[in-house]
Every structure is written in structure tokens, then in C-alpha cells.
Amino acid sequence: MNSYTIDLGKISEEKFATICQKNPDGKFELNGKGELIIMSPTGWETGKRNAELVGQLWLWNRQTQLGEVFDSSTGFKLSNGAIRSPDVAWITKEKWVSITPEARAKFPSLAPDFVLELMSPRDTLKATQAKLEEYVGTGVRLGWLINPKTRQVYIYRPGKTWEILDSPSTLSGEDVLPGFVLELSFKTFSIIM
């Protein structure tokens, strides 16, 4: 997915919401500097992989009822002012019930507990890593960056150096997503080719 950063001066949350409303077919984020990021749609292979990731987390969450799962169209307002849309996100049930229905219709000011970013062929590792560092720096408790091209997964946790796994067949949700195991095996799921 290609993305372009446009410096229009610091954009407020209200102005960002207006841009999104006036351009419903666009995909936008706001970085911590208040700059607008315009993103192109993903290709079919990346879209298929991302749907599989959301599906696995959704199924686990449906069984456990521990929180809420969000797709890549969902904006989260982080504590640094950025409004980001991770490919997959999850928050605890406690966070969900603490958000008013009015706030749910906008971009609630909270970091997800878990995020996952799936690199597409046009993403750069440096930019995607910076995004994961931003997530963890603003309250995300567990982040995964999956790079299908190199068959590597980067795991981010607060206060720790990221960890790299080479060609893992599964990933554990650890204590953030208790009992969740993401299946990445080559035979049943071609997320890492």
C-alpha cells in the first residue's frame, strides 16, 4: 500500500473527521505531527491475508468474549494526537464499556490493547516499524508486525526491545490475548509465503 504524507499545517481532530466524511471512499490517517496521510487500497493478496488475520482474532474473541475486534478501517486517537488505523486491533471489554455511544461514533481517545500491521509489497519496513513503536509508546500492550516477504514477525511490547521471529508457524497472544494463537502455517494459511 502506498501512502503519502501531506503537510497542511496541524490538522485538528474535527478537521480530520470532516475530511474523512467528505471523502468516504478514501483511507486516511493523521500522524502525531498533525499531518494528513493518504493511503491507497491494498492489493488482493494483502487484503486476503488481512481478512484471515481479522477472522482468526474475531473467532477467538467470539468464543472468549474478552473484548472487541476492529478492522483496518477503524481510527484510534492516540495520546500523541495521531489517529491511526491498524490492520487489526483489539481492546478489552472494560475499555469498550467505558466509551460512550457518542464517542464510539467518532475516534475515541485510547490506544488499543493489541495491534497488528501486515506489510504489503509497497510498505517500507522502517515506516511500519515506526508505526509499531508509536503504538507501543502510546499505550498498546502488544504489537505484531508481519512481513510476508521476509517471513519475519516483529513483536513489540512496552519497555522492551522488539523481538524478531523467523518463519513462525504460530504466534501467542501472551497475557494480552489469553489463549489466542494466530495460525501462520504454510499449509493451512499462506500469510507468510
Image (cartoon, rainbow, N blue to C red):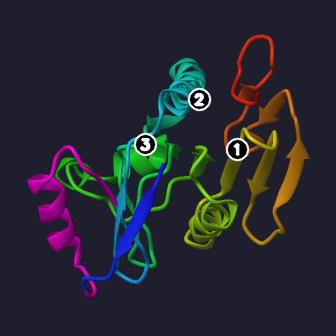
Image coordinates for residue 17, horizontal then vertical, percent: 18, 62
Judge the density around disc 2: few (<14), some (14-19), many (≥20) Cα neighbours within 10 Å: many
Label number found at residue 12: none
Q: Quadrant of residue 37?
A: bottom left
Is disc 1 placed on a helix, strand or loop? strand
Q: Quadrant of the C terminus?
A: top right
Say what amino acid the circle numbered 3 marks. Answer: Ser
The residue at the far right in this view is 166
Label number found at residue 146: 1
Image coordinates for residue 6, horizontal then vertical, percent: 32, 75
Question: On the picture, is 131 further left or further right than 190?
Answer: left
Q: Nearer the viewer, mark 1 or mark 2?
A: 1
- Mark 3 vs 1: CB contact within 8 A: no
- Mark 1 vs 2: CB contact within 8 A: yes
Q: Is residue 116 above or below residue 84?
A: above
- Mark 3 vs 2: CB contact within 8 A: no
Judge the density around disc 1: few (<14), some (14-19), many (≥20) Cα neighbours within 10 Å: many
Label number found at residue 53: 2
Report the residue marked by disc 3. Answer: 72
Is disc 3 placed on a helix, strand or loop? loop
Residues rendered magenta in the picture: 9-28
On whether residue 17 falls in the magenta region, the answer is yes
Q: Earlier in the sequence, mark 3 or mark 2?
A: 2
Q: Residue at x 51, y 54 (%)?
A: 112
Q: Residue at x 81, y 19 (%)?
A: 186
Image coordinates for residue 98, horizontal then vertical, percent: 36, 53
The one nearer the camera, 6 or 164, is: 6
Say what amino acid the circle numbered 1 marks. Answer: Ile
> Disc 1 versus disc 2: distance between alpha carbons?
11 Å
Q: Earlier in the sequence, mark 1 or mark 2?
A: 2
